[in-house]
Amino acid sequence: MHLLYLHGGTLDHFVGTGKVKCLDALNPGRLFDTVHMVNVNTRSASDQEHDEASFQFTEIGLGDESTGRLGRLFALRKALARIGDRNRPDLVLADDANLLGAAARYVAGRYNVRYALCVYYDNDLHYRLTGRPTLSFLRSRRLECLWERHVFGGAVGVFAMNRGYFEYGVRHGAPRDRAYLGSWSVDDIFYEERREPHPDSRELLLVGRLHPLKYIDDLLHALEKLAKHLRLDVAGEGEDRNRLETLVSSLDLGRRVRFLGRVPREELMARMQGAQTLIVTQGFSAAVECLLSGRPVIAYEHECNTEVVRNGETGLTVPFRDIDSLAGAIARIDGDRGLAQRLGQVGRRKMIEECDIHNSIEHRRRFLQKCLNEHG
């Protein structure tokens, strides 16, 4: 049995952060003899490959803009056909109902197999935040919804790891009897017992891609309002780095803010353990990882954050993009060590119970087995 998995993560991300060490979660119960993970990189013009045990990675480079949008589309179809001809899939899995989902539908039709989808984002939310569809070339959220309905409706199964994404999938065309609600889990390292804090940790830590929709600006403006002993580390890399570094300089925060770049997961966990407070602006995985660290977490009431960061119980939540409330919550934890300890302990305990990695893998195994049975 062979799974073709059209994945949103880049090859560099998987190898560079060490995530290739925990790939069993992507082939639960060894349902498949081989798994071929494929992603698209629009910034590179060349393909890359990497093998790891029974997993094969292919990154399709579509960064040659001289071919135009139509040329890149044909190049993608050709690359997917080449990959499928090399090892015909028994099931195709995609990480969204957008480009990856459409590609999965194409590959499944070519080889007369079924495809399934995972939901990791809410495009309604993206439209509310930006005023643009996620698939910007469509220029219309209405057209994008029709696209999603077409892709969701043809899937043999749709998997979501939290309630918010489950309802989003159903709302946009996934038949409820083919939608599966699992549970969220993150890299296995975050479940390990507390390790030695990183000796170079700072009081505040935010982990995330440097992107405008991560709203790191808000935290910088909040830091400006806070006592000068509070310093911030930002772990992550991305397109927004130059702009954020310029903002740090303009706010005269150069001695209080560091951009660490991409941090290996072992070091990242140690930095989490050494931080006084962890900040989550956007990103459900980041919320779970931060809670598992056992440190107090402050999160925006945004996306699905409040499913796990529950105000006053597992962490503190503040209204979305309310900089004064964000600064107030940071100051509150800074001034109340008892509260910080309680939030950290309860947050970790609840995440171990609710986001247990073994339960999450079992949910995924049952979902994929159901998809294979439907195929049969």
Image (spheres, rainbow, N blue to C red):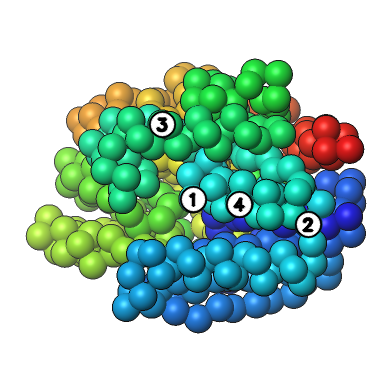
**Mark 4 vs mark 1: in front:** 4
Q: Amino acid at mark 1?
A: Leu
User: Looking at this view, is 153 or 48 the one in front?
Assistant: 153
Q: Amino acid at mark 4?
A: Tyr
Element class at badge 2 = loop
**Residue 59: % across, % down:** 58, 70
Q: Earlier in the sequence, mark 4 or mark 1?
A: 1
**Residue, disc 3:** 145
Element class at badge 3 = helix
Element class at badge 4 = helix
Q: Earlier in the sequence, mark 4 or mark 2?
A: 2
Q: Amino acid at mark 3?
A: Cys
Q: Earlier in the sequence, mark 3 or mark 2?
A: 2
Q: Amino acid at mark 2?
A: Pro
Left or right: where 234 falls relative to 47:
left
What label sits on residue 99 in the rendered view?
A: 1
Q: Quadrant of residue 336?
A: top left
Give the CA distance from mark 3 to mark 2.
Answer: 28 Å
What label sits on residue 106 in the rendered view?
A: 4
Q: Is residue 252 above or below residue 138?
A: below
Q: Earlier in the sequence, mark 1 or mark 2?
A: 2
The outermost residue toward the bottom is 46
Tell me whether circle 4 and circle 2 mark residues in contact (CB < 8 Å): no
Give the CA distance from mark 3 to mark 4.
Answer: 18 Å
Can the viewer see residue 341 in this picture?
no
Q: Earlier in the sequence, mark 1 or mark 3?
A: 1
Tell me whether circle 3 and circle 2 mark residues in contact (CB < 8 Å): no
Tell me whether circle 1 and circle 3 mark residues in contact (CB < 8 Å): no
